[in-house]
């Protein structure tokens, strides 16, 4: 039986919080009311050595299950255990960042948030990385699930930028994983790690020069009530798919509109104008249109404000991991769409959109580069060369719905499930970055859906580095 009380004496100098402590609730605070996990304790190390001390002490105390928390954006709260009873290693204090201008790399602590790294890269030579859409997501979490966002169609995934990681494995050893050291561990971490292989304490990534003169955010909207939705959807889909790779579009159905929004990443004003013309020249007149030139770093906050459930941070300097400041209910589903949508499917989707609740629900298609096909054995990302990453969610802010939040969310969940079942036959399974235990329903295997053909290899690597399955949660390999 685990003896958590011994941990505090064994880990003097490290913050350790246990059930019943006055600050326990503060340390497990989460923004998502959909999940309410209760770990048996939380440790907050400030260095790699302290992480190693925690892991060794936890095992000596007889604790059987450990999870890793970073940005806290797992939708099933895997960082808090994914279910009750885990011990959490919270990496939020591992937040140092440095750069090496000679080889265009950044090394960031495992607890850094995406926005922190984006801000640092921009401030140190106007560099960038192709990150996800929400700047409060944790860096270590995102590199372990692909790292897709409004820069991916142009520059690939964040996971592919990882050159090496420092990781404390379940035996308490500090190890480096790269193409040259522990290559199988490096493969597993990049794309399907999910905290299954230990605590990532630092990450070295390759950056690129940010485009300067031809960067813009855009949005075009068509009313679902006033437009021929099937016709508009087809033209929009075809135009977005055929647009230059400098155009990073997301097609969204929500709030009573059909929208395409995104970021254009050109090097010149002329290039921006040409890309915009190519995207829009065959589209029907929109009910609203915006195209705004921005510095690359400003697009990070723009995207958060307009296309995420967390539009709180106008200034990236104010970023912090979300707790209970802006609580909301969020349930999400996602999957890779390996082919362009057929005309028949678009007609079905347009018809189905008529039944969509006007608030608190969205369906989206993020454009990717279908010709970006790295060797499948270099990372554990399960799908490459796909034109679309589909996502959908129910999200309701507690500040708006109050005590009715859960009731209103449950009213919308059947629609979400129907939408996912509409898409599922044309997907190649789920996306692990948007974790959802319901993926196990309808006769499907959650593990096969999320990990694909890499599952057997990942389980073999897991057995080598964590034979006791110390680092585990319901989605661990």
Image (cartoon, rainbow, N blue to C red):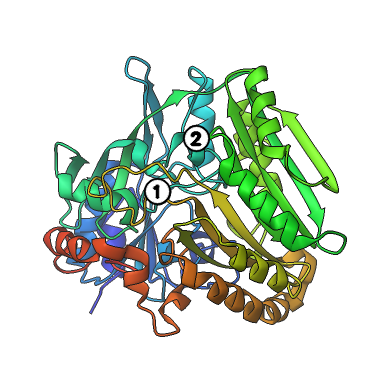
Percent position (x, y) of residue 194? 34, 59
Percent position (x, y) of residue 250? 62, 49
Q: Residues within 10 Å of mark 2 (few under 14, many from 20)?
A: many
Percent position (x, y) of residue 208? 43, 24
Between residues 396 and 367, which one lies in front from this camera angle?
367
Q: Nearer the viewer, mark 2 or mark 1?
A: 1
Q: Residue at x 75, y 78 (%)?
A: 404
What label sits on residue 477 in the rendered view? none
Question: How far is disc 2 from disc 1 in space, using C-alphas?
Answer: 13 Å
Percent position (x, y) of residue 418? 60, 78
Can you name the residue that lies furthest to the bottom here?
443
Please give left or right for residue 198 compared with residue 90 in the image. Answer: left
Between residues 294 and 355, which one lies in front from this camera angle?
355
Q: How many numbered marks does the figure carry? A: 2
In the displayed structure, 349 sits above or below 248; it is below
Q: Quadrant of the C terminus?
A: bottom left
To which quarter of the image does residue 108 belong?
Answer: top left
Can you name the residue that lies furthest to the top here?
102
Circle nearer the N terminus (2, 1):
2
Between residues 25 and 349, which one lies in front from this camera angle?
349
What label sits on residue 154 in the rendered view? 2
In the displayed structure, 212 sits above or below 152; it is above
To which quarter of the image does residue 315 belong?
Answer: top right
Q: Secondary structure at mark 1?
A: loop
Q: Which residue is mark 1?
A: 385
Q: Secondary structure at mark 2?
A: helix
Q: Residues within 10 Å of mark 1 (few under 14, many from 20)?
A: some
Does residue 329 show up? no
Please give left or right for residue 302 compared with residue 189 in the image. Answer: right
Q: Residue at x 32, y 64 (%)?
A: 451
């Amino acid at each position: 039986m685990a003896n958590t009380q011994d941990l505090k004496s064994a880990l003097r100098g490290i913050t350790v919080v246990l059930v019943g402590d006055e600050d326990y609730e503060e340390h497990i605070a989460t923004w998502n009311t959909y999940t309410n996990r209760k770990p048996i304790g939380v440790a907050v190390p400030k260095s790699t050595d302290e992480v190693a001390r925690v892991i060794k002490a936890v095992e000596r105390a007889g604790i059987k299950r450990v999870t890793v928390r970073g940005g806290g954006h797992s939708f099933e709260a895997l960082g808090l255990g994914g279910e009750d009873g885990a011990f959490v290693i919270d990496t939020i204090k591992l937040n140092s960042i440095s750069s090496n201008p000679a080889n265009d790399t950044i090394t960031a602590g495992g607890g850094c948030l995406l926005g922190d790294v984006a801000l640092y890269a921009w401030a140190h030579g106007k560099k960038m990385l192709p990150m996800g859409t929400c700047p409060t997501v944790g860096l270590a979490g995102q590199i372990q699930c692909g790292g897709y966002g409004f820069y991916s169609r142009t520059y690939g995934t964040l996971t592919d930028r990882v050159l090496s990681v420092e990781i404390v494995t379940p035996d308490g050893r500090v190890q480096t994983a790269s193409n040259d050291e522990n290559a199988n561990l490096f493969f597993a971490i990049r794309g399907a790690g999910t905290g299954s292989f230990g605590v990532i304490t630092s990450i070295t990534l390759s950056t690129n020069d940010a485009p300067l003169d031809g960067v813009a955010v855009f949005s075009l909207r068509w009313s679902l009530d006033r437009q021929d939705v099937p016709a508009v959807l087809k033209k929009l889909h075809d135009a977005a798919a055929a647009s230059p790779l400098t155009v990073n579009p997301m097609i969204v159905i929500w709030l009573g509109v059909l929208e395409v929004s995104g970021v254009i990443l050109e090097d010149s004003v002329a290039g921006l104008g040409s890309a915009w013309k190519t995207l829009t020249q065959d589209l029907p007149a929109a009910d609203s249109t915006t195209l705004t030139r921005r510095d690359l770093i400003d697009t990070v906050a723009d995207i958060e404000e307009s296309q995420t459930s967390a539009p709180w941070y106008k200034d990236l300097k104010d970023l912090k991991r979300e707790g209970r400041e802006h609580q909301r209910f969020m349930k999400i589903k996602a999957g890779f769409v390996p082919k362009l949508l057929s005309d028949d499917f678009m007609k079905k989707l347009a018809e189905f959109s008529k039944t969509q609740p006007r608030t608190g629900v969205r369906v989206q298609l993020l454009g990717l580069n279908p010709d970006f096909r790295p060797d499948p054995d270099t990372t554990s990302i399960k799908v490459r060369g796909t034109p679309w990453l589909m996502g959908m969610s129910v999200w309701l802010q507690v500040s708006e719905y109050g005590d009715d939040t859960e009731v209103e969310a449950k009213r919308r969940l059947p629609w979400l499930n129907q939408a996912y079942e509409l898409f599922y036959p044309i997907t190649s399974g789920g996306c692990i970055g948007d974790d959802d235990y319901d993926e196990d329903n309808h006769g499907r295997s959650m593990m096969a859906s999320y990990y694909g053909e890499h599952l057997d290899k990942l389980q073999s690597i897991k057995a080598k580095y964590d034979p006791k399955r110390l680092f585990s949660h319901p989605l661990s390999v």
